[in-house]
Image (spheres, grey):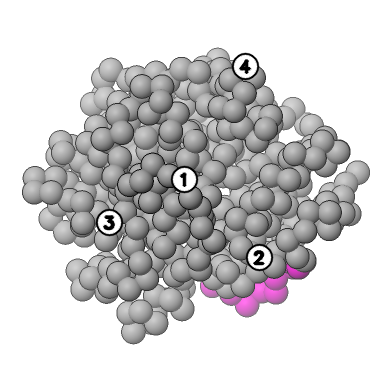
Amino acid sequence: MELFNLKEPGERVSFAQAVKQGLGSKQGLFFPAHLPRFEDIDALLKLPLAERSSEILSRLIGSEIPRNRLDDMVATAFNFPAPLAKVEDNVYCLELFHGPTLAFKDFGARFMAQCLAELAKGEKITILTATSGDTGAAVAHAFHGLDNIQVVILYPKDKISLLQEKLFTTLGDNIHTIAIEGDFDQCQQLVKSSFDDEETRQGLHLNSANSINISRLLAQICYYFEAVAQLEQRDNLLISVPSGNFGNLTAGMFARVLGLPVQRFVASTNLNDTVPRYWRSGQWQPRATKATLSNAMDVSQPNNWPRIEALFEQGYLDKALLRTDAIDEEYTQLSMRQLAALGYISEPHAAVAYKALTRALEQGQTGIFLGTAHPAKFRDTVENVLGQPISLPPALAEVAGKEGLSLCQGADYPALKKTLFELVGE
C-alpha cells in the first residue's frame, strides 16, 4: 500500500512507514495513493465480521502483511460484536460499544496495536496521543503490557467524565497519563508540537494513536460494512455519524469509495460546529471550543477533515453525498428523552447523531446512527437527563473505585517535553 502526505504530495510511504510514523512532514496526513473498489458487495456482506474485515484490509494493505498474519491480527482485534439495534421501523443504532472499553475506539486502537506489534520488529516506540474521552481508554487497554511500547495520554483536566477517565488513568505499567489544564484542542496542539520537535520525535521514537494514524482509520471502515450486512433492505440508506475529530466519518466515506451502498452521510456535530458552518459558507473559521454534554466531540479544529476534502478533490466522491448538522444542548437532551420513550437508552453523542438523522431522513429511506459509547460511561449525564438510574457494566464497575495515577500540568510545551523525557526517555 502506497500513501502520500496531503501537505507534501512528494512524500510517499508504505503502510508500515505510515503506521510507525503517524504524521508526515508539516504535520501532513497520509492518504492512500489508490483506493480500490469491490465489485461483488453482496458476496462480501455475506461473510462474518472478521473474515470480511480481513478481505477489506488485505485489499487495502496489500502484501506488506502476510494474509495469514493479517487474519490472526483481525481476529484478535475484532473479537467482539457490533450489533445493529432496531430503534424504530426504519431507524437503527449501530452499537460500537461492546469492546473492552465500551466505545467505538476499540476497533481502531486494537488493530493499530496489532499492526505496531507486527511491524515494529522490537523497536522501542512511544505512543503519544490526546483524548477527548474514549480514545484514551481504547489506546491504553490495546497497548497495555506490550513489550517495548510506552504510552503517554494527554487529556483535558475536568472535561471528560470521571468513568471515562478511570478507564485509562488506573492502569499504570507502560501507560502514563497527564491531565492538561486546558481543552482538547490544546492537548492536540501539544501532541503536534511534540512531533514537530525533532529532538522529542527522534529521542522518544514517537508515534500517535489518534485517528490520524492510518491503521486506526482503515480498521474503522470495517464496521460500516458490518452495519449494512445486518440490513435486509439496503437501498436508500442514510448514516448519521457523531463527529468530533472526524476520523469516524472519514472511515465511513472510505467505505463508500470501496463500494458500500450508502446514499448519504450526515456529519453530526454539537455546538463545536466548525464543519457545518464551513459547509454552508465555504469559510473555515474555528471558534473557541465549547464544553458540551457530548464531550468527546468538543473539537473545533478536526484533524481528519483534510482527508474528507481529499476524497472530494480527487473525484472519489461527490459533495452531494454529505450533509452536515449541528445539534445544541437542548436538542441533545430532547433526543435522549425521545430515544428513551422508544425504549432505547442512549448517551449524548449517539443522541446528537439520532437528532441529526431524524432531521435528514426522508420517506422511503432507512437510517442508521452510530452508538459510539455505552451510556454508562456517561452515567451522571444520562441519569440527570432521563431521571432514572442505569447500572454499570463490569468493565466500569471494576475501575469506579480505583485511584487515578495521572500527573497534572499546564498547556505548556517546554514543560511537557521535560515531563516526557522523565517518564519514557532512555
For marks 2 and 3 on the same chain, the one whose residue lies earlier in the sequence: 2
Residue depicted at x 51% and y 58%: 287
User: Which residues are drawn in magenta?
Assistant: 397-408
Residue identified by numbered label 2: 182
Residue depicted at x 46% and y 17%: 34
Check disc 4 and report its element: helix, strand or loop: loop
167 relative to 153 in the view: left or right: left
Q: Position of residue 334 (x, y in %)?
A: 27, 73
Tag 4: amino acid: Gly
Q: Give the quarter of the image for residue 180.
A: bottom right
Q: Nearer the viewer, mark 3 or mark 1?
A: 1
Residue identified by numbered label 4: 10
Q: Quadrant of the N terminus?
A: top right
Residue identified by numbered label 3: 356
Tag 3: amino acid: Ala
Q: Nearer the viewer, mark 1 or mark 2?
A: 1
- Label 4 to label 1: alpha-carbon separation: 26 Å
Tag 1: amino acid: Trp
| Residue 267 showing in the rendered view | no
